[in-house]
Image: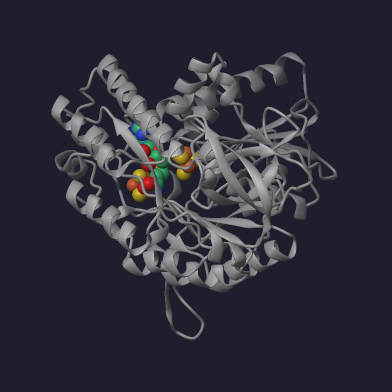
């Protein structure tokens, strides 16, 4: 699996900009992820996943439901009996991309007389079901994110009746807690574990509460069971997932209330050699308890994806993020004082409704103050149903949005390069994920703080923790030399991460 930073949002504007610079076709980067682990079955299914990590994790649930019902998984779309597209609706371009893909598949089915069942899953399902089914007649199946258990029945119904089958019902309870995800596109080392679904936050720009419904937390015991199983299978890293993991809460069997900090602590105790990450953390309720878990548990990584979205308090208020610029900066200070050396990444939106030039500059100055290691940056894209769509005007001209986005990207790139330079001479514990993209003679891995490192592979092996001395860097990658293998327990004693 690619580094988490690359798949966070597959239609990330920043990634597109970078691709253009490197002369890579941005569409190449938008290539959907597809399964490589073939599974035999009576009918073969091909799953394409767009969007965020939650969607990647959901596709693993879909694979599990289908496998239990006798379906196989294929890596070849052209050989599949069923093609399922797990869709994203976060920005307009994400939706357009999926539409284009559906039209292609539909044409293929029609022109070649191919016996293919074509389904839309995920975040576009509820919103676009009528359009997809009636107006555009693109698909045979539309299934929302809470209805995946119903897939086998819906597939039968579509095949038998020749009519489209639909279930886009959102649930207040479904967490798929009892299903064992099939990690069909995994490197065997890093896995996502979904701990909650939906979102109750209602940020004014965001469509997720409408596409995924109410927030609900998965039982602690089922999360710990899944993590234990991953450890038993040799996994070395888990990323626990939710739209806002900080609002995780579950009343345990013995009546104790389990917060996210408590859950993270328990997950980290499953194995001292398992790295634990999480995404996404909402700044409004990132507690000191949570920061102390970062400090006290050596295998909880010193890295937080803490999306700020904007640097101006008035804009944050209109975004309904419920924190001010000052509160966010205080949180960063608090985190750094509780857990020195902790690193941050962010999501930033350029050109939100009514954003003035001064307000935009506040985003740049906030970035200067925080100095993110990484940022996912987006032009505001108006989404139907949202509060912003109903109440505000999308009034920042496209070329202004673009220019502001570019200013943010340029600054972020500068910060990332400077932050990487500061690593030269330090030694980091790196989990070896596999060969680097460029050469089989080099390994790629990540530091505790989520920076990518490339180094000569020598006799080391995928899945080992190694101490790597950083010798050089590019703006996106650290370059180093492995010194010796290590364990996380040992690393806690010897690392020089702390600045
Ligand atoms: N739950 C996460 C975010 C999930 S969506 C959180 O609250 O941090 C991922 C990112 O997409 C958001 O953080 C935001 O930066 C971006 N995004 C969401 N809606 C958007 C919109 N309408 N236009 C542009 N970017 C958007
Ligand atoms: Fe969207 Fe806000 Fe929920 Fe994140 S917290 S998913 S941005 S509504
Ligand atoms: Fe994720 Fe896109 Fe849905 S970002 S939650 S797949 S709208």
Q: Quadrant of the N terminus?
A: top right
| Front position in the image: 129 or 56 | 56
| Front position in the image: 115 or 4 | 4
Image quarter where ligand 1 lies: top left
Q: Is residue 210 visible?
A: no
Colour basis:
one colour
The answer to which image quadrant residue 222 occupies is bottom right
Q: In the rendered view, would you say 109 is above or below 253?
A: above
Percent position (x, y) of residue 475? 47, 30
| Front position in the image: 143 or 467 | 467
The answer to which image quadrant residue 373 occupies is top left
Q: In the rendered view, would you say 200 is above or below 351?
A: below
Residue at image point 53% right, 19% down? 26
Residue at image point 57% right, 16% down? 24
Side (left or right) of 63 relative to 23:
right
Residue at image point 60% right, 39% down? 480
Side (left or right) of 253 relative to 246:
right
Percent position (x, y) of residue 316? 21, 43
Percent position (x, y) of residue 273? 64, 64
Name, please, the residue furthest toward the bottom.
254
Q: Is residue 451 visible?
A: yes
Side (left or right) of 294 relative to 430:
left
Q: Count the marks: how many? A: 0
Q: In the rendered view, would you say 236 is above or below 265?
A: above
Percent position (x, y) of residue 254? 49, 86
Name, please, the residue furthest toward the front.
425
The answer to which image quadrant residue 246 occupies is bottom left
């Amino acid at each position: 699996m690619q580094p988490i930073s690359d798949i966070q949002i597959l239609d990330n504007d920043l990634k597109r900009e970078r691709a253009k610079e490197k002369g890579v076709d941005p569409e190449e980067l938008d290539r959907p992820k597809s399964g490589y682990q073939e599974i035999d079955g009576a009918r073969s299914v091909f799953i394409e996943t767009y969007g965020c990590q939650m969607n990647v994790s959901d596709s693993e649930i879909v694979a599990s439901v289908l496998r239990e019902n006798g379906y196989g998984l294929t890596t070849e779309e052209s050989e599949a009996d069923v093609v399922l597209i797990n869709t994203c609706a976060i920005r307009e371009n994400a939706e357009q991309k999926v539409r284009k893909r559906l039209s292609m598949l539909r044409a293929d089915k029609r022109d070649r007389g191919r016996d293919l069942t074509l389904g839309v899953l995920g975040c576009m399902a509820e919103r676009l079901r009528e359009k997809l089914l009636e107006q555009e007649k693109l698909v045979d199946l539309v299934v929302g994110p809470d209805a995946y258990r119903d897939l086998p029945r819906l597939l039968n119904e579509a095949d038998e009746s020749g009519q489209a089958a639909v279930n886009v019902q959102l649930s207040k309870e479904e967490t798929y807690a009892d299903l064992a995800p099939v990690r069909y596109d995994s490197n065997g080392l890093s896995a996502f574990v979904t701990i909650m679904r939906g979102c109750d936050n209602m940020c004014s720009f965001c469509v997720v509460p409408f596409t995924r419904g109410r927030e609900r937390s998965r039982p602690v015991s089922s999360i710990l069971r899944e993590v234990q199983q991953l450890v038993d299978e040799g996994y070395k890293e888990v990323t626990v997932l939710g739209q806002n993991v900080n609002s995780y809460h579950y009343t345990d069997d013995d009546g104790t209330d389990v917060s996210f900090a408590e859950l993270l602590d328990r997950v980290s105790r499953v194995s001292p050699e398992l790295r634990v990450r999480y995404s996404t953390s909402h700044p409004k309720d990132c507690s000191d308890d949570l920061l102390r878990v970062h400090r006290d548990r050596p295998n909880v990584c010193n890295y937080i994806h803490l999306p700020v979205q904007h640097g101006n308090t008035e804009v944050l208020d209109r975004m309904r993020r419920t924190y001010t610029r000052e509160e966010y900066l205080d949180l960063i200070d608090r985190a750094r004082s509780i857990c020195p050396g902790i690193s941050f990444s962010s999501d930033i939106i350029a050109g939100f409704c009514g954003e003035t030039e001064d307000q935009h500059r506040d985003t740049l100055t906030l970035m200067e103050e925080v100095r993110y290691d990484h940022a996912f940056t987006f032009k505001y894209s108006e989404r139907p149903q949202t509060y912003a769509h109903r109440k505000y005007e999308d009034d920042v001209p496209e070329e202004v949005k673009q220019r502001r986005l570019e200013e943010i990207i340029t600054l972020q790139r500068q910060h990332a390069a400077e932050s990487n330079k500061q690593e030269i001479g330090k030694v980091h514990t790196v989990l070896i994920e596999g060969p680097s993209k460029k050469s089989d003679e080099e390994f790629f891995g990540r530091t505790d703080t989520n920076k990518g490192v490339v180094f000569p592979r020598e006799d080391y092996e995928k899945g080992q923790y190694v101490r790597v001395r950083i010798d050089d860097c590019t703006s996106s990658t650290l370059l180093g030399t492995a010194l010796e293998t290590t364990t996380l327990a040992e690393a806690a004693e010897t690392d020089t991460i702390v600045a």
